[in-house]
């Protein structure tokens, strides 16, 4: 008698919309779906990809998709509330090698209880970009200034001196050297670089007013003053950090790409974003500045990946593992890099289709997976053959070695914006310690409420 066909279960993956993630599901279905009895479909998550959006989506979906992609900042709150399933038992049973992941990608996937709740798919870090032509016009040797990525000597005082030299350049009087208020180098990084920190290890207490943090914010205020005052620092509508490496990122009127600023802090994805509109841009890059020449290097990291919902069948653990394999990453990258042009203008007021990458001519870099071996392979395969941008992408990968995620927090959507508010308040004239005290009090209230509101 013929063997009865296995009954298939169709289960969903809740994730932000992309071309590549459905291809990962297709690859799983083709290779393993029939044998395991599970066919995966990707359900797009509406709205912005932030902790508040995920919290709302998971609360509303009830018994929805059993696999969810989420930013790792959401893990502590969701895990504490019982909205995620711990993965430790699966890892131990299969002797799954977590050492394949870089610490900055994997660490945020743990809850405050010490259990692992997600596997990383993407991770990014920050670095400092500069306009080589601006430095040349101002008579600044970027290597002597410490901006040589091969022999970096980037530190706070070097950044300050370069900014002052740019201010003195006769041809560059209308150009802002850099913006102490921009989000590419958040206040968290300046505090870390100065030996500070923002939350206790258990995530229950805000430590915004540590002396190291106050000193870091005071330094930023001094820089704003030396660069021509608060008005220049608080230029409105500064673009957000690049996240997609495509025309989805803010491009129109970008002050760095337009030549209105010389130094720009952003993510590693910014190199790819630039290639969409300004592949000829005279870009340079270097690590985030250290506090002093002898201080350790530190920059920020943001990561995200896949988690299981409570009640998810054990058979989905292999699917979760597959979604973060090298094969899945290759399938994803190939789908993204060979997509056809889409209708619609690239920028407001311009005509023609967006500059989509085409087969055989890649102008797009896959996001970092947080697995060094995988990322090195993808970096070798997806090149533009333009030396400086390709090396900039490689340099961004190196920064993951020094990247630090934000401290684990039960309510990141309420706590971390307070640091941005404190920085802007200080730049507008509030004494730095007072600005941080106000933010700390609000953060502590939010942490206390989050602690009471969860089990």
Image (cartoon, rainbow, N blue to C red):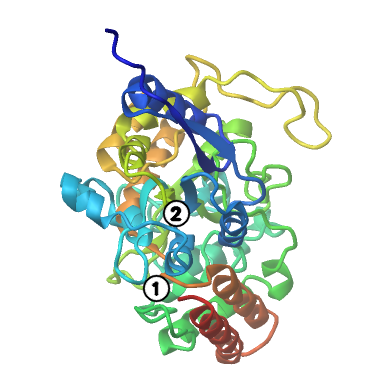
The answer to whether residue 431 is above or below residue 229 is below
Residue 425 position in % (x across, y down): 67, 81
Task: Report whether residue 386 is seen.
Answer: no
Residue 12 position in % (x across, y down): 51, 38
| Residue indicated by mark 2 | 127
Q: Residue furthest right?
A: 349
Compare residues 157 and 140 and report the one nearer the observer.
157
Residue 111 position in % (x across, y down): 37, 66
Graded by Cα atoms within 10 Å as few (under 14), some (14 to 19) or many (20 or more), the crowding at tag 1 reads many
Q: Is residue 320 left or right of residue 449?
A: left
Q: Is residue 443 left or right of residue 293?
A: right
Q: Nearer the viewer, mark 2 or mark 1?
A: 1
Graded by Cα atoms within 10 Å as few (under 14), some (14 to 19) or many (20 or more), the crowding at tag 2 reads many
Among numbered discs 2 and 1, the one appearing first in the sequence: 2
Q: Residue furthest top?
A: 1
The answer to whether residue 103 is above or below residue 39 is below
Q: Residue at position x 32%, y 29% from top? A: 36
Compare residues 10 and 154 and report the one nearer the observer.
10
Q: Which secondary structure lies at badge 2?
A: strand
Quarter the N terminus occupies: top left
Q: Which mark, by number, is residue 275? A: none
| Residue indicated by mark 1 | 192
Compare residues 343 and 315 and report the one nearer the observer.
315
Spatial CA span between label 2 and label 1: 15 Å
Q: Residue at position x 31%, y 47% from top? A: 150
Residue 165 position in % (x across, y down): 54, 63
Compare residues 35 and 70 and report the one nearer the observer.
35
Quarter the C terminus occupies: bottom left
The answer to whether residue 30 is above or below residue 249 is above
């Amino acid at each position: 008698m013929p063997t009865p066909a296995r009954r298939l279960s169709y289960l969903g993956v809740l994730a932000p919309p992309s071309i590549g993630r459905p291809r990962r599901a297709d690859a799983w279905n083709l290779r393993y779906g029939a044998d395991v009895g599970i066919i995966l479909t990707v359900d797009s998550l509406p709205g912005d990809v932030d902790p508040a959006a995920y919290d709302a989506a998971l609360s509303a979906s009830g018994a929805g998709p059993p696999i969810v992609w989420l930013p790792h900042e959401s893990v502590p709150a969701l895990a504490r509330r019982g909205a995620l399933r711990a993965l430790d038992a699966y890892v131990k049973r299969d002797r799954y090698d977590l050492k394949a992941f870089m610490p900055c990608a994997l660490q945020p996937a743990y809850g405050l209880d010490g259990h692992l709740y997600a596997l990383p798919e993407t991770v990014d870090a920050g670095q400092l970009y500069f306009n080589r032509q601006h430095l040349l016009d101002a008579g600044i040797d970027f290597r002597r200034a410490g901006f040589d990525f091969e022999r970096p000597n980037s530190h706070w005082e070097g950044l300050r001196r370069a900014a002052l030299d740019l201010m003195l350049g006769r041809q560059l009087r209308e150009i802002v050297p850099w913006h102490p208020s921009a989000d590419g180098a958040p206040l968290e990084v300046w505090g870390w670089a100065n030996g500070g920190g923002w939350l206790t290890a258990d995530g229950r207490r805000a430590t915004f007013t540590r002396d190291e943090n106050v000193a870091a914010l005071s330094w930023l205020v001094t820089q704003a003053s030396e660069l021509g005052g608060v008005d220049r620092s608080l230029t409105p509508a500064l673009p957000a950090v690049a996240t997609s490496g495509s025309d989805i990122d803010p491009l129109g009127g970008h002050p760095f790409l337009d030549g209105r600023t010389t130094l720009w802090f952003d993510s590693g994805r910014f190199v790819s974003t630039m290639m969409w509109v300004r592949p000829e841009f005279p870009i340079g890059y270097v690590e985030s500045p250290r506090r002093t020449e002898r201080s350790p290097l530190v920059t920020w990291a943001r990561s995200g990946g896949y988690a299981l919902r409570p009640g998810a069948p054990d058979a989905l653990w292999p699917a979760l593992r597959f979604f973060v394999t090298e094969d899945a990453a290759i399938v994803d990258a190939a789908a993204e890099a060979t997509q056809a042009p889409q209708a619609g203008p690239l920028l407001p007021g311009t005509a023609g289709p967006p500059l989509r990458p085409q087969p055989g001519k890649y102008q797009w870099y896959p996001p970092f997976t947080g697995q060094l071996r995988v990322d090195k392979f993808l970096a070798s395969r997806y090149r533009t053959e333009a030396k400086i941008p390709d090396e900039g992408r490689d340099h961004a990968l190196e920064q993951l070695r020094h990247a630090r995620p934000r401290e684990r927090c039960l309510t990141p959507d309420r706590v971390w914006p307070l640091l941005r508010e404190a920085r802007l308040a200080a730049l507008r004239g509030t004494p730095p310690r007072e600005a941080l005290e106000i933010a700390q009090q609000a953060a502590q209230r939010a942490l206390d409420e989050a602690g009471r509101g969860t089990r």
